[in-house]
Image (tube, rainbow, N blue to C red):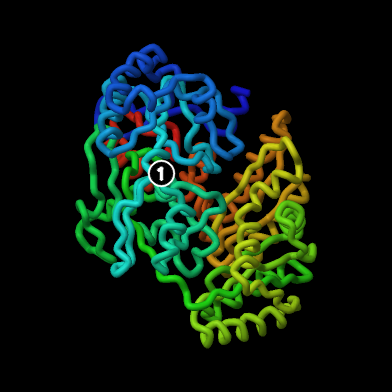
């Protein structure tokens, strides 16, 4: 397993000693703090957070050594800590810095790129007990939350105020984790991603100092004040600091919501329809693609009865008049491409069932091959290139013999291939690594990205270099080295 781990992820990295260039050299994980050093910090940490909020129990450590990705953990964190306040996080980070112990921020563990896998001698800071909604300003359409608040918990709270937060990755992820990975979801085509919806962050830096990326208490809708520190930390995947508060944009609930399903004879016809809808400027809220394998999986897992064919799930938001106009335009485009009539889900319970099925597609796909390990790709390409890229990708999947499903937030050019791998077959993983590299390079060559919403984590560092270029990677390394010179903050991820 160790050789497979190194094949997929590469080994951990720490900064060079001397100089401020930020260049990074490769060392084995044995260069990190020894377990005895970390355990020696346990008493100091317990004095900060309480003994009930620190654990070195094997079962607890194993619960925190993985996410939902295909990456195989080779170690567990030596300590797991549950802080409850920003000040506690700050003090724990200072202790870790003094011991040069790697720090792994942890939310709900639903990531798909190995972002929480821990090197030996590390301390996992679990933020799930920091789950308070702190400030709600409905008149200004913003809310401030602690990082452990999940998206469903926030929307449950906002519902009574006629508001909602639309960013919706498939899992009920924590909002701190969503900010850290630059998460997205089915509503991104109309509402954007986390990067467009975070107004301010409170971050504990690797030396324990506390940063407010837009100024303490600040929550303007726009700003030209200096460098955009908020965007620097959104998508940084815990490598620059630990998010302890997030101020987010929220939205009024639409006057009406209507969801529909339609199917097509071919993948090309379905994807072409999406492209044409967007080119016509239709302000559609959601437009999701499922291939017939995805449809089959969701039918079985979520008790649906959709035709086994390339399918679009759609949702329209707005006034009655605007939705009527949207439906007419989209209906004409679908018909022109040979699509079926819309099957409507107008009742709230029917819409919720439809979109829950879409959000559960990761688990629905895994259920197709019990005991398998899932791998989800995450490329995003310009809309005009999407039909070609998807069709070429399907050819590769069939040629390489994968059991797979394809699903995508195709309204913004983002789609996922879910590969179902034999967890005991190293050749399966090698072949999957080859496929992800081919797909990532295809997306990059089309003017896209190797990750639209999952992040770089462990597995896409080489693709990031190809996408950003040597100069871009050099600048990123300089930023990392300046903020985290000891490389204790989620080391080995992204760079």
Instruction: Indicate left or right for 190 with 292 as reference.
Output: left
Quadrant (top left/top right/bottom left/bottom right) for the C terminus:
top left
- The residue sitting at 27% across, 55% down in the picture is 228
User: Percent x, y for residue 337?
Assistant: 72, 78
User: Percent x, y for residue 126?
Assistant: 41, 34
* 394 in relation to 488, above or below: below
**Does residue 336 appear anywhere in the picture?**
yes
How many labels, in total?
1
* 380 in relation to 7, above or below: below
**Does residue 471 appear anywhere in the picture?**
no
The residue tagged 1 is 148
Instruction: Indicate left or right for 9 with 396 as reference.
Output: left
Q: Secondary structure at mark 1?
A: loop
User: Percent x, y for residue 56?
Assistant: 45, 19
Farthest-out residue, top = 36
Farthest-out residue, front = 160
For label 1, the crowd category at 10 Å Cα-Cα, with few meaning under 14, some 14 to 19 and many 20 or more, is many
Most foreground residue, 298 or 114:
298
User: Percent x, y for residue 98?
Assistant: 26, 22
Q: Quadrant of residue 102?
A: top left
Most foreground residue, 483 or 300:
300
Q: Quadrant of residue 155?
A: bottom left
- The residue sitting at 71% across, 68% down in the picture is 268
Most foreground residue, 67 or 237:
67
Instruction: Indicate left or right for 1 with 177 as reference.
Output: right
Quadrant (top left/top right/bottom left/bottom right) for the N terminus:
top right
- The residue sitting at 37% across, 50% down in the picture is 234
């Amino acid at each position: 397993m160790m050789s497979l781990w190194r094949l997929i992820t590469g080994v951990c990295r720490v900064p060079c000693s001397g100089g401020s260039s930020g260049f990074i050299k490769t060392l084995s994980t044995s260069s990190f703090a020894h377990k005895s050093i970390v355990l020696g910090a346990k008493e100091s940490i317990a004095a900060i957070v309480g003994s009930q909020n620190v654990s070195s129990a094997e079962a607890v450590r194993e619960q925190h050594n993985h996410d939902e990705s295909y990456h195989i953990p080779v170690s567990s964190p030596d300590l797991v800590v549950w802080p409850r306040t920003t000040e506690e996080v700050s003090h724990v980070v200072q202790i870790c810095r003094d011991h040069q112990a790697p720090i792994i921020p942890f939310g709900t563990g639903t990531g798909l790129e190995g972002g929480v896998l821990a090197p030996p001698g590390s301390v996992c800071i679990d933020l799930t007990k920091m789950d308070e909604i702190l400030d709600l300003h409905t008149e200004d359409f913003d809310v401030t939350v602690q990082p452990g608040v999940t998206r469903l918990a926030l929307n449950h709270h906002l519902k009574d105020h006629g508001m909602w937060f639309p960013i919706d990755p498939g899992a009920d992820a924590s909002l701190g984790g969503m900010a850290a990975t630059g998460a997205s979801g089915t509503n991104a085509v109309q509402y954007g991603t986390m990067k467009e919806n975070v107004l301010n962050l409170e971050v504990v830096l690797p030396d324990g100092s506390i940063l407010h990326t837009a100024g303490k208490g600040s929550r303007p809708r726009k700003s030209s004040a200096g460098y955009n520190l908020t965007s620097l930390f959104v998508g940084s995947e815990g490598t620059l600091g630990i998010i302890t508060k997030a101020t987010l944009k929220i939205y009024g609930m639409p006057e009406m919501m209507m969801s529909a399903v339609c199917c097509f004879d071919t993948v090309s016809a379905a994807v072409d329809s999406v492209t044409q809808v967007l080119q016509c400027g239709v302000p559609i809220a959601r437009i999701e693609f499922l291939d017939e394998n995805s449809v089959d999986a969701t039918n079985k897992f979520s008790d649906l009865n959709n035709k086994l064919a390339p399918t679009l799930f759609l949702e329209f938001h707005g006034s009655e008049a605007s939705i009527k106009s949207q439906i007419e335009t989209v209906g004409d485009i679908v018909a022109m491409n040979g699509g079926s009539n819309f099957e409507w889900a107008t009742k709230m319970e029917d819409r919720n069932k439809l979109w829950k099925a879409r959000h559960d597609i990761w688990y629905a796909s895994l259920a197709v091959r019990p005991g398998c390990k899932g791998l989800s790709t995450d490329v995003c390409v310009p809309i005009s290139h999407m039909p070609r890229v998807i069709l070429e990708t399907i050819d590769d999947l069939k040629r390489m013999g994968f059991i797979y499903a394809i699903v995508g937030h195709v309204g913004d050019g983002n789609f996922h291939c879910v590969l179902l791998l034999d967890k005991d077959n190293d050749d399966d993983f090698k072949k999957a690594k080859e496929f992800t590299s081919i797909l990532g390079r295809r997306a990059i060559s089309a003017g896209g990205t190797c990750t639209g919403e999952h992040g770089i984590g462990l597995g896409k560092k080489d693709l990031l270099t190809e996408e950003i270029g040597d100069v871009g990677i050099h600048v990123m390394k300089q930023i990392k080295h300046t903020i985290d010179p000891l490389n204790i903050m989620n080391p080995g991820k992204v760079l």
